[in-house]
Image (cartoon, rainbow, N blue to C red):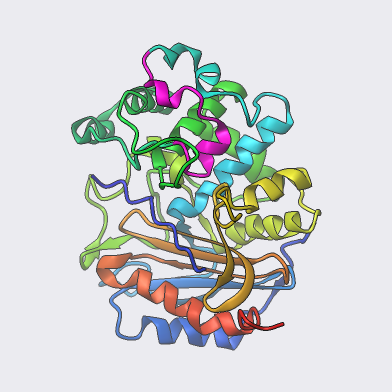
Amino acid sequence: MRQRLAVLAFLCAATAARAAPPPELQAALEHAMAGQAVPGMAAVVIRSGQASDEAVRGLRRIGQADAVRPGDRWLLGSDGKAMTVVLVARLVEQGKLAWTTPLAGMLPGLAAGMRPEYRAVTLVDLLSHRSGLPENLGDEAFFRGLYDDPRPLPVQRLAYITRALAEASIGPARSEPSYSNTGFLIAGVIAERAGGMPYEQLMEQEVFRPLGMTSVLFLPWRGPGPVGHVGGRAALEKFDPNPPMLDPAGGASMSMADWARFCLDQLAGAKGQGRLLTPANYRLMQTGHDANGLGFGLGWGVGATAMGRKGPALTHAGSDGNWYAMVLLLPRSGNGLLVAANAADSMGGDQAAAAVLREMAPSLAPPKDAP
């Protein structure tokens, strides 16, 4: 099963003002790609709430001479989960949803068929990976059938979650977190019902348009621009990408500048100056929902440190097996780093992204034991 969206990296109103990409960021890309097969990469550094122009290196597609360009779109995978959370929070603030409503109340038509252990699960449980739901649907034959499913995406998602809610849990809700793409798909269906339109349209209306994010496309991938890669080839075969119904769990591709716009709003929100949500809902997103307030926030990994540097830190990584994207945000300083690659673990994209973070981290925050 391709469902490779579940990559979470625990590396533990600002405007999108632009500055030239620092030479050290370009050098970090060059160092990170050396010895790896990843064709192309891009990165943006954020300092004091200001995003640089992106640094780019490499090729859009292996075996061709077309170089990566500023403004190209990159598939973010599960880095888009925080965007899904913002959509849900917007609907909460509009009075269309509530954080504490039980799942049986939000999906009454499915209540009779869902397992009893899921009926009291809330949106916070779903979005902090503490619902008890498995990572993905266990019925692989059904999943593969989604690639040829002609039904509208909301209908496909409803069919998926109906099956998922009948599968056994992996543990009690609100106990140890366990990463779940299915939880985000359920939240996507709930948002569709509350908002009265497909998830993709809701995201455009509630998140992307207000932040000026104009480059966003959802699955399936469409050119021109970088192509994902797997196993030394362009990932253009039928089952290489995820089916579009998985969008709420991480199907968005966008320019690095647009991704930075979202991250800048998250950093501004941590200081009570975000454009999309109340300060309370930014805090809800950016606080861990386990006993010590670390671990899983809503759409974020939350850590006291990251890469050996002083936090608090918000982190995430995303991949469908063909692309890899990683983000580190440091709310206290307003600093951060966004990195994307058009290949994942089979071609060293994950290692290259982590290497860029390691090289740049000392310039973003003091050592973790600094006073």
- Identify which residue, 111 or 355, lies in the foreground: 111
Q: Answer whether residue 219 is magenta in the image.
A: no
In the rendered image, residue 2, in percent from the top left (x then y), is placed at: 26, 47
Image point 30% across, 35% down: which residue? 137
Image point 52% across, 44% down: which residue? 128
Q: Is residue 139 above or below residue 30?
A: above
Image point 51% across, 47% down: which residue? 81
Image point 59% across, 84% down: which residue? 362
- Would you say 42 lies left or right of 36 here? right
- Would you say 256 lies left or right of 96 here? left
Q: Answer whether residue 114 is magenta in the image.
A: yes
Which quadrant would the N terminus be assigned to in this image? top left
Is any part of residue 196 visible from this angle? no
Q: Which residues are magenta?
A: 113-131
Q: Is residue 336 above or below residue 244?
A: below
Q: What is the quadrant of residue 95 in the picture?
A: top right
Which quadrant would the C terminus be assigned to in this image? bottom right
Q: Is residue 49 above or below residue 218?
A: below
- Would you say 197 lies left or right of 350 here? right
